[in-house]
Amino acid sequence: MYEVKLDAFNGPLDLLLHLIQKFEIDIYDIPMKALTEQYMQYIHAMNSLEINVASEYLVMASELLMIKSKMLLPQPEADESLEDDPRDDLVGRLIEYQNYKEYTELLNDKKVNRAAFYSKHPTDLSHLETNELMSSDNTIDLTELIIAYQKVKNRVEFNTPKTVEIKKETFTIQQATTQVHERLQQQQSFNFFSLFNFSEPIEMVVTHFLAILEMSKSGIVNIEQQKSFEDINILRGVNYGIG
C-alpha cells in the first residue's frame, strides 16, 4: 500500500461537484441514488489501484449512503412541507464550497494580473522635511496677488520699447470715391461687399468704408441695411451727379 495526493480533486466536496457538473445534475434536487453510485465507483477505483483513499472521502461515502437510505424509508403521512429534506445539509455545503472555489479562481486571476505590474518602494524624503511653520502673518489674499501681478505686467509693458511702422499711403479716399462713382454710373445700387475680392489689404477696405461715409454725409449716396448684420447696399443719393 502507498499513499498519493489526489491532484484531481481537493477533497470529497470537490469530487461531488465534479460529478454533478459532469452528469448535469441539478444541485438543488440531487438524485441521491445516481450520485452515490458514481461516488462509490470512484472510491472502488481508488481501492482497486491500491491507492490509500483519504479518510474524508470515506466519511463522505457514509454520509451519502445515510442520506440515500433516509430517502428510501417510507415517510409518515404528515404534512410533507414540514419535513426536512435529508439532502439540505449536503446541498448547503456544496453551494458554499462552490462559492469558495469560484472566489479562489477569481483571486488567482487577480494575482496573475497583479504580477504584471511593478510597485515602486516608498522613497525616503525625510531629509526634505522641515519643522518650520508657516506664520499666518505671511499669507496673502488672492486679490492682492492679482493686483501685484497686474502692476508687474504694466511695468513690463511700460519699459518695453514701442515700435511704430509708418507706411506710405498707397490707396487714397479719392481713389475709393472714384470707384464708387464708377459703380453707381453702371447701376443704381450695389452691395458694399462686391467692391472686394477679400484678398486686399485691410487698409483698402477701411479706405472704401471711410469714402462711403463721406459720400453719405454729402448726400451723394444712401446706405441701406434691411436687418442687423445683413449685407450693406449702396444707392444713389439726392446729391448724386451734382457738382
Image (cartoon, grey):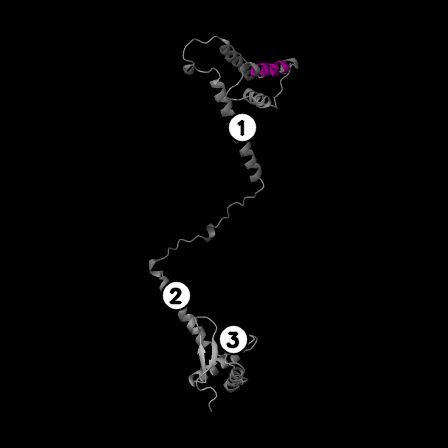
Residue that extends furthest to the bottom in the rendered view of this protein: 243
Front one among 171 and 185: 185
Main SS class of the magenta portion in the image: helix
Residue 110's label in the rendered image is none
Above or below, comparing residue 87 to residue 148 in the picture: above
Q: Position of residue 233 (x, y in %)?
A: 48, 76
Q: Are marks 1 and 3 in contact (CB under 8 Å)?
A: no
Between label 1 and label 3, give the one nearer the viewer.
Answer: 3
Q: Quadrant of residue 229?
A: bottom left
Q: Which residue is mark 2?
A: 146
Q: Which badge, 1 or 3, is on the more N-terminal residue?
A: 1
Name the residue rendered at 33%, 60% in the picture: 137
Residue 193's label in the rendered image is 3
The amino acid marked with disc number 1 is Lys
Front one among 65 and 11: 65
Q: CA distance from mark 1 to mark 3?
A: 80 Å
**Tag 2 secondary structure:** helix
**Tag 3 secondary structure:** helix
Read off the magenta span.
35-45
Name the residue rendered at 40%, 69% in the picture: 150
Q: Are marks 1 and 2 in contact (CB under 8 Å)?
A: no
Q: CA distance from mark 3 to mark 2?
A: 44 Å
Q: Which badge, 1 or 2, is on the more N-terminal residue?
A: 1
**Tag 1 secondary structure:** helix
Residue 101's label in the rendered image is 1
Q: CA distance from mark 1 to mark 2?
A: 63 Å
Q: Are marks 3 and 2 in contact (CB under 8 Å)?
A: no
Name the residue rendered at 62%, 13% in the picture: 44
Q: Position of residue 86 (x, y in %)?
A: 47, 15
The amino acid marked with disc number 3 is Phe
